Image (cartoon, helix red, strand yellow):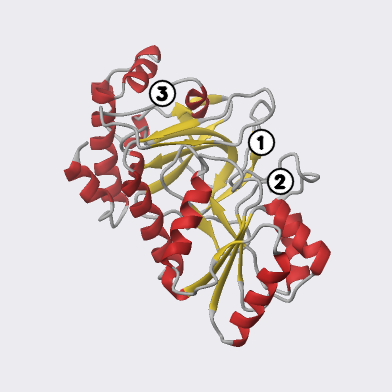
Amino acid sequence: MRTDLRDRIFKIKDQADLCKAALEVFNYQYDNNSVYQEFITSLRKTRDAVKTTDDIPFLPVEFFRNKKIITGNLPVEMIFESSGTTGVAPGKHFVNDLSLYEESFLKTFLLFYGDPGEYLIAALLPSYTEREGSSLVYMADRLIKRSSYPLSGFYKGDIEDMMRTIKNAKQEKQKTLLLGVSFALLDLAEKLSPDLSGVIVMETGGMKGRRKELTRSELHAILKEKFNVPSIHSEYGMTELMSQAYSKGNGIFYCPPWMKVVIRDPLDPLSLYTETGRTGGINIIDLANINSCSFIATGDLGKLHDDGGFEVLGRFDNSDIRGCNLLAV
């Protein structure tokens, strides 16, 4: 692995830094990722034709279902696997450096929320904790281990215990984060309607097959009313990525400096929109994904805002709805 590139990825300050690093990562992955190189060749493009980040081809996320997408020759430490849908092969992310994933999500959490050690972190992730290979559970577990609050942890069937813990933390004026998949948060809202004022409630998506699909705005409206909170936070991540984007309300997400979203023309997937506000396919540059592929064309629809934020507006009809925040808006 290019250790010099890894060091610089997390020191990116602005778009100029990102663009320069992205071109270096592209060249490295073109040379050392056979699947990515074959894909680029199939487009009749060459490495030398890529002069700017707008020229970089984005690998369709569907490749992760039946190809081993890996850059370099380091041994695989862990395989993250998407939840998938019935009859559809799950996406698999072959991770050969878990410390890189940890550095990415910890630095991102610090950037958006501060030190996880200062929070009570209650994770409500049923079904995800019951299977192996969930990148979301891995992240939540490491954040929980960073918490200095002794009762931080995963809560499954012991919801009343979780609510007592949160109530006590509120009385102690303890920072609290309730991290949950959408269907579990909705169940909690409808069954108990607890007062969570002062608590950061963060949904990570995941309604698939559990409840009637709701738009994100519908879900957030219900949760805000039932939980007595002014906004619902969200996390946007994917099994195939090493980084996450966060929304602190209104469904508008922001990326860490080493991650960028661009929008492709849904009728011409090799063309990118240069203006904001247009709906199209979400392409992601994730430079922390240096050992896999940093340039991924997702199955999500979205649009960019002028301030650099983005919205997720749903999925292409021929794409499966997966967990990890793929709700429609």
Alpha carbon separation for disc pair 2 and 3? 28 Å
Q: Taking 128 as reference, is 66 above or below it?
A: above
Measure the C-alpha gap from mark 3 to mark 1: 22 Å
Query: Percent from the top left, x then y, of residue 10?
Result: 28, 53
Q: Residue at x 44, y 21 (%)?
A: 67
Q: Residue at x 21, y 50 (%)?
A: 7
Q: Earlier in the sequence, mark 1 or mark 2?
A: 2
Crowdedness near tag 2: few (<14), some (14–19) or many (≥20) residues, C-alpha within 10 Å: many
* Tag 2: amino acid: Met
- Which residue is drawn at the image coordinates 48% and 63% (left, top)? 144
Check disc 1 and give the amino acid type.
Ile
Does residue 306 show up? no
- The residue under label 3 is 68
C-alpha gap between disc 1 and disc 2:
9 Å
Task: Classify mark 1: helix, strand or loop.
Answer: loop
**N-terminal-most mark, 2 or 3:** 3
Type of amino acid at the residue the image marks with label 3: Lys
| Residue at numbered disc 2 | 207
Q: Nearer the viewer, residue 221 or 275?
A: 221
Q: Residue furthest bottom?
A: 172
Which x, y percent locates residue 184?
71, 55
The label number, if any, that marks residue 244 in the structure image: none
Do labels 2 and 3 touch, CB within 8 Å?
no
Quadrant that contains the N terminus:
top left
Residue, disc 1:
321
Residue density around tag 1, few if under 14, some if 14–19, many if 20 or more, within 10 Å? many
Residue 241 in view (yes/no)? yes
Q: Residues within 10 Å of mark 3 (few under 14, many from 20)?
A: some
Instruction: Confirm or deny contact between disc 1 and disc 2 (CB under 8 A).
Output: yes
Q: Earlier in the sequence, mark 3 or mark 1?
A: 3
Q: Residue 51 in the image: state x and y as whole percent.
A: 26, 30
